[in-house]
């Protein structure tokens, strides 16, 4: 315990702290404890925090932890309570990361977390917003089945129902594409969720005041991956929406076009085939800005696009190459697609 100088800690304070965390004796005078705490605040706070941390590894039933945590919260010291809360949250979220299936009968980290949340709500009238926001990041690093299992333990202490958690996940889905995957995975567990809400995420992103950044574009493309949602988006897709997409696509990088065999390109063309022109324009422009190792590497990328996306016309590719005077690639393309030879004289 190198961080705490025991010579600076009042023996009576040490005794009261150890009674609180290592016995089931709760006959501790709150006023006397607070007085001792403040007599040498920093050293006493460090000692108390250390003893709480070590005792939180020992299994005690929830009634005992409720009494201990109630005592702590009733001290009414924000800095003091914050140091305890950090330990509780750290232990709980570490438990989620390292254990496949948590259990409220055996995992002391979960017992303490639940009791602390319950008391924060009842004693402090806290809305638990900070804790809820952290739980909304679970889809980033946690298996979906595991999340469902965890949230069932947190209802009704942290969330009033599973629907509350699902709705908060939806509201933050424009920040994290994994949230959309999680919401749609709820169907497998017969948890019904309105797919129209996911379609609204697509429109919310493209209609925002600013051109979406890479993270938001990832969410935008994610909404197009699911056929049901793509069909909902398609119903309301207008000429104005297409014009907005035509402003967004020039901001996309190679990875966004090429990933998973041009998955994003295919989905955009399912949404509106006329987007092919802007896709050809932007993708080929990026190809010809590349520094390449061999002379046919740019042409190879063009062929890869044509092979993966049947809605991209080789004739339109030929027109673009001709208008941009890419003579080598025109020759390669005609060799690859002999039917284009008859058009070569006109482009």
Image (tube, rainbow, N blue to C red):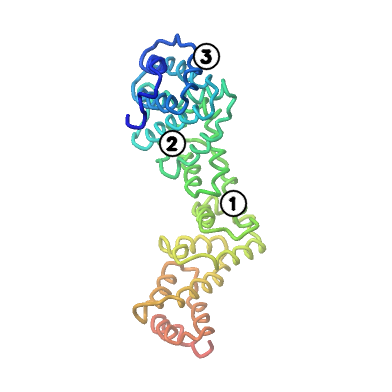
Label 2: which secondary element: helix
Mark sitting earlier along the chain (3/1):
3
Q: Nearer the viewer, residue 170 or 111?
A: 111
> The residue tagged with tag 1: helix, strand or loop?
helix
When the figure is inspected, residue 335 is found, relative to residue 13, above or below; the finding is below
Is the residue 12 above or below the residue 5 in the image? above
Residue 31 circle label: 3
Q: Residue at x 50, y 35 (%)?
A: 191
Closer-to-camera residue (106/274): 106
Quadrant housing residue 141: top left
Q: CA distance from mark 1 to mark 2?
A: 28 Å
Residue 295, percent from left and from top: 36, 82
Relative depth, front residue between 297 and 303: 297
Tell me if residue 235 comes above or below residue 253 in the rendering: above
Label 1 Cα neighbours within 10 Å, binned few <14 / some 14-19 / many ≥20: some
Say whether marks 3 and 1 touch (CB < 8 Å).
no
Tell me if residue 51 comes above or below residue 306 in the rendering.
Answer: above
- Where residue 317 sits in the image (x, y, percent)? 49, 77
Number of the label disc, if any, that sits on residue 27 = none
Mark 1 highlights which residue? 232
Which is closer to the viewer, label 1 or label 2?
2
What's the distance in space between the residues labelled 2 and 3, CA to CA?
42 Å
Q: Quadrant of the N terminus?
A: top left
Residue 21 placement: quadrant: top left
Q: Are the residues tagged 2 and 3 within 8 Å (C-beta)?
A: no
């Amino acid at each position: 315990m190198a961080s705490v100088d025991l010579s600076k800690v009042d023996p009576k304070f040490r005794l009261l702290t150890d009674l609180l965390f290592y016995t089931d004796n709760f006959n501790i005078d709150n006023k006397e404890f607070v007085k001792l705490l403040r007599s040498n605040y920093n050293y006493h706070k460090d000692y108390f925090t250390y003893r709480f941390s070590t005792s939180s590894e020992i299994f005690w039933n929830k009634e005992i932890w409720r009494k201990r945590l109630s005592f702590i919260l009733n001290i009414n010291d924000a800095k003091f309570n914050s140091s305890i809360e950090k330990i509780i949250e750290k232990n709980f979220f570490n438990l989620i990361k390292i254990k496949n299936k948590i259990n409220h009968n055996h995992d002391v980290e979960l017992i303490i977390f639940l009791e602390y949340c319950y008391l924060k709500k009842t004693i402090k009238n806290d809305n638990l917003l900070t804790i809820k926001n952290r739980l909304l990041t679970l889809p980033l690093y946690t298996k979906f089945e595991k999340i469902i299992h965890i949230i069932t333990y947190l209802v009704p202490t942290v969330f009033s129902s599973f629907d509350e958690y699902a709705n908060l996940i939806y509201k933050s889905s424009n920040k994290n594409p994994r949230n959309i995957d999680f919401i749609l995975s709820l169907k497998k567990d017969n948890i019904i969720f309105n797919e129209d809400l996911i379609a609204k995420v697509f429109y919310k992103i493209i209609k925002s005041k600013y051109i979406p950044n890479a993270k938001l574009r990832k969410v935008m493309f994610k909404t197009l991956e699911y056929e049901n949602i793509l069909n909902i988006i398609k119903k309301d897709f207008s000429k104005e929406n297409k014009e907005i997409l035509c402003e967004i696509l020039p901001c996309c990088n190679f990875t966004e076009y090429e990933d998973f065999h041009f998955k994003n390109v295919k989905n955009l063309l399912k949404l509106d085939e006329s987007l092919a022109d802007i896709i050809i324009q932007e993708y080929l422009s990026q190809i010809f800005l590349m520094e390449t190792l061999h002379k046919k590497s740019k042409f190879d990328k063009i062929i890869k696009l044509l092979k993966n996306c049947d809605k991209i016309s080789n004739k339109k590719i030929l027109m673009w190459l001709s208008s941009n005077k890419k003579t080598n690639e025109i020759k390669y393309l005609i060799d690859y697609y002999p039917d284009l030879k008859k058009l070569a004289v006109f482009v």
